[in-house]
Amino acid sequence: MKTRPFARVAWLLALGVVFQLGTLSSHAQDLATAALQPKTRPVEPPTIEQQTLLGIRLDATVFSGSTPSLHDLRVLDASDAEVPFALRKLVTDKLRTVRQYTAIVNPLVRPLEDDALEIEFEIDPDKHKGPLHGFTLVTPLRNFEHRVTVERQDAADEPWTTLAQDLVIYDYFQFMDVRNTDLAIPKELNFPAWGRYRLRIDRVTQEQQSPWRELTRSVQGSEVTGQEERLLVNRQPLRIERIDFWRENEVVESSQPLLTDYPLAGITLKQDSESKSTWVDLSSAREPITELTLVTPDNNFSRAARLLGMSSGSGQPPFPAAQRELATTTLSKIDLAGIQREQLQIRLPETRETDYRVVIANGDSPPLADVAFTAKGPIYELVFLGNPGQTYRLSYGDANREPPRYDTVAIQAALAAKASPLEATLGPAANDLVQVTRTNWLRVLNNPWVFGTLILGLVVLLGLGLRQAATRIESLPD
């Protein structure tokens, strides 16, 4: 049987595509093997006597040898079984103090002979088991000052205990808009809210000078024979509408990632005369970086800056390197005529590049002297449940692993309740005995050069087929 010319061409193209796929897949496999090799590191936990939350902080060795999404991380026990874990960023919480008020019910009021006032009340132990930090007297009055003593009694047959005395409540509206009606209890006493309390208010009735004066005139006929002027004094009792007791709770107002310093290596500088800028090339071990800070002894400058991520266009040579813009900002430092202001940080989305370039625009100004940069980024912690007597290993570097799907509800609930895992450390890294030999064909086919070659081959085959069909049609008799 004779092979038609278009069939021979099709076979040659197919062989070329297969060869290209094999070359690129081998190339990708070689790069993956060079950049990511399966490794394990022993986990050295503290001594525990029961099942406990353990935390492993990822270091530069783990970041440099793992995938960008960290989906290849695994915790293995002594039998090589996977241990469920949760990966989180450490955060720092900004706390805010909030008062929780509760109204006193059924107070007993007793006026005393020395113009004092006693108020007794009881706080239900079944409803209020938390701490008590103070009381607030709610009153509509203005311009007053009273001293208050706070006492507490645990049971009816026990003596009264003085919690605080000579506490001053006041309103100085006639002088300034200043007011305080809180009775704060020292927090170091740390007693529960329930119990019986007694407030003693001294001089509950105050004499206040009235802004008005009384003028009396004696008149005989048409003449004023006498005149008397008297100041008026108001007797103002303390009017209390209600009493609230309160406790102070700390709530999280906001949470920010806890940052740590990550080292930068291979800092090189180049003055580009064409663009009149300074190029600062930086290298890292693929740690997660969110902030770069300029270090220079120079003052009084303001320069536009761009941060670029230097990565290969497809991740495979011989394709040229691509520059991906990560952030732009203006770096400035002013210390002149009493003005001190600086902005030396370049903030960027969390990035795990190996190479960065900072382009500082100088214009016609001289370059900055002794330029250097420091880097900061979040701290990643891997949290799992450790058992006493068990040994664990951290495995990473297998790019073909799928992201794990563990049941971590218990771990997440404990972390949400602010449980603190015990810190475990990592030992030295060692190559994994089980080497990965399978090829991730999906990633190879996602390569634009491979996909383009396939499309081009199919178009050529289709064109040849159409040409062959047209030739046959022309050869048919009319």
Image: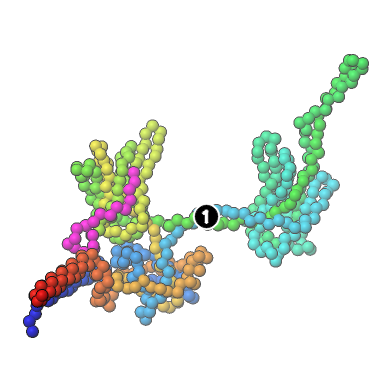
Q: Is residue 311 left or right of residue 226?
A: left
Please give the residue where the numbered disc 1 appears in the rendered image: 253
In the foreground, 339 or 274: 274
* Helix, strand or loop for disc 1: strand
In the foreground, 162 or 309: 309
> Three-letter amino acid code at disc 1?
Glu
Residue at 69% in and 37% down: 173
- Magenta stretch encompasses residue 52: no
Q: From which residue to which does the magenta span run?
A: 312-330
Q: Is residue 453 visible?
A: no
Residue at 23% in and 62% down: 314
Q: Position of residue 339 (x, y in %)?
A: 40, 35
Quadrant where the image shows the N terminus? bottom left
In the foreground, 138 or 375: 138
Report the label total: 1
Residue at 40% in and 75% down: 83
Hey, which quadrant is residue 272 in on the image? top left
Q: Position of residue 178 (x, y in %)?
A: 65, 40
- Magenta stretch encompasses residue 329: yes
